[in-house]
Amino acid sequence: MPLQFTSEPRLDDGVLERPFALDEIPGFLWTPASASASRPAPLILLGPPPLGLGRAYPRLAARARNAAAQGFATATLELPGSGDRPRRPAAEQARAGLRRALEAGEPVSDEIIDALVLPLVEEAVPEWRAALDALLPLPGIGGPAGYSGGVISIGIRLAAVEPRIAAAALFAGSLVPRALFEEARRVTVPLHVLLQWDDEGNDRQAALDLFDAFGSEEKSLHANMGGHTGVPRFADDAALAFFSRHLPRSSAGV
Amino acid sequence: MPLQFTSEPRLDDGVLERPFALDEIPGFLWTPASASASRPAPLILLGPPPLGLGRAYPRLAARARNAAAQGFATATLELPGSGDRPRRPAAEQARAGLRRALEAGEPVSDEIIDALVLPLVEEAVPEWRAALDALLPLPGIGGPAGYSGGVISIGIRLAAVEPRIAAAALFAGSLVPRALFEEARRVTVPLHVLLQWDDEGNDRQAALDLFDAFGSEEKSLHANMGGHTGVPRFADDAALAFFSRHLPRSSAGV
């Protein structure tokens, strides 16, 4: 898919922000101003929450600035069905089912989780791989790449199937279909898993079981206090320390 | 208790190592060579494993060097019944009971855990508090202090009762008496809990329950792959980042 920068780059605090469209999908690329063709910055894909990039922008841009301060380029992409992208009727229906179950205090059925998440994974993962195709050849961007945050099921599939993802920091904060537990066993790259201990929308035991399922020889679970949106700043720093260990700074782009 | 330095200080790699005796209890103090009365280094107490300081020395000295590189002083103390200190017959008997249970593949009874750990905590905690009395007034040493590693039950009690401990990094790697779970609820200082996910001598669920029990508003669990002795180097770095956030560098000693 062709990538086009859609507006003027903006330099803020040593970070170059470039909005782009990948085919029709909006996204952002952030690079440290110091990155160049001869000193490319390793790339971390920032998975957004399914809120739309508009609402998620402040938090994503803050993560991008932290990452740039450690020498990383970052990029994000609107998820299927989020922001201004066409709504997916099946997903809307599943979301209504989820809401009903939560309001009734009932357990969320595997059917609802599968309907909500599996089509999203199916659609999103090829888009993120296309983003890698388009971003990694840019001057100043290095590979291999990392994936960080967002919808964990997308991260699992991407880490399992995409050889250019060399390390992943995943946020155990969403409903994970049974099928993805099986895919988790096939993930072998170093993993850094973040868990909010009191996450109201997340089953803690399921998150621990998922962590246990990953096939990676190096995996770390970082559990911090607070709810879904209460991730402490030092958790970002720990994830960046993880990427600094695993994304080598190449002397030329890939 | 009086503290006496027992041999010449040794300067190695920018770290000053000073063996001492607190009353009759052997210990080590490590300080960054750069620490001075006008620039005191915050102190981290390094809890040793119950192996004796002789056998534990290489690992403790490595942790001390890493800590010194981040500007911290560290100190350790021989545990009651370890090294050349008099054996405690009741503990030896409990240890034999533990060994029999493990060999028979039976669960370790609360009675054995209590007999093994409670008297050790009773005896050790006043010694570590006396070590703080003796170490904190030394020129070049700052307070408040941290506690890191070792027998977790000692760390729980110390964090619960000693106001000069401002932050603790605990290693979920030993048998914890029920009574200490209750004391854990009274701990309020920031905590960094390390768990080896495949620790053969440690019940993972009990470790997660203990983490849940701590009363601290800021607590983080870092679980890494590997057995009891396989703690990765980056886990030390993460614990030091935790202490850097919580042990302020005072401009004069306390």
Image (tube, coloured by chain):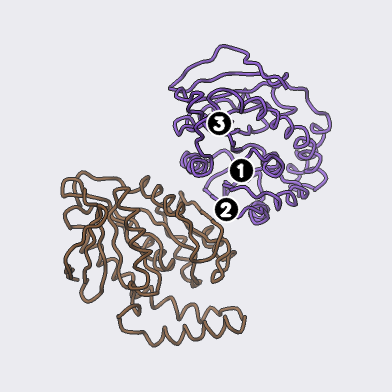
Chain colours: A brown, B purple
Q: Secondary structure at mark 1?
A: strand
Residue nearest the observer in this picture, B171 or A133: B171
For the N terminus of chain B, the quadrant is: top right
The answer to whether residue A188 is above or below residue B69 is below
For disc 2, the marked residue is B218
Residue type for callout 2? Glu
Q: Secondary structure at mark 2?
A: loop
Q: Is residue B22 left or right of residue A82?
A: right
Of the numbered discs 3 and 2, the one sitting upstream in the chain is 3
Q: Residue at x 70, y 42 (%)?
A: B153
Q: Is residue A84 left or right of residue A138?
A: right
Q: Is residue B99 left or right of residue A186?
A: right
Of the numbered discs 1 and 3, the one sitting upstream in the chain is 3
For the C terminus of chain B, the quadrant is: top right
Residue type for callout 3? Gly
Residue nearest the observer in this picture, A244 or A132: A244
Measured Cα–Cα span from mark 1 to mark 2: 14 Å
Foreground tag (3 vs 2): 3
Q: Residues within 10 Å of mark 1 (few under 14, many from 20)?
A: many
For disc 3, the marked residue is B142
The answer to whether residue A135 is above or below residue B29 is below
Of the numbered discs 1 and 2, the one sitting upstream in the chain is 1
Q: Residues within 10 Å of mark 2 (few under 14, many from 20)?
A: some
For the residues beneath circles 1 and 2, the answer to whether they share a chain is: yes
At which x and y percent is residue A24?
22, 76
The quadrant in which residue A227 appears is bottom right
Q: Residue at x 19, y 52 (%)?
A: A140
Report the disc number at residue B170. 1
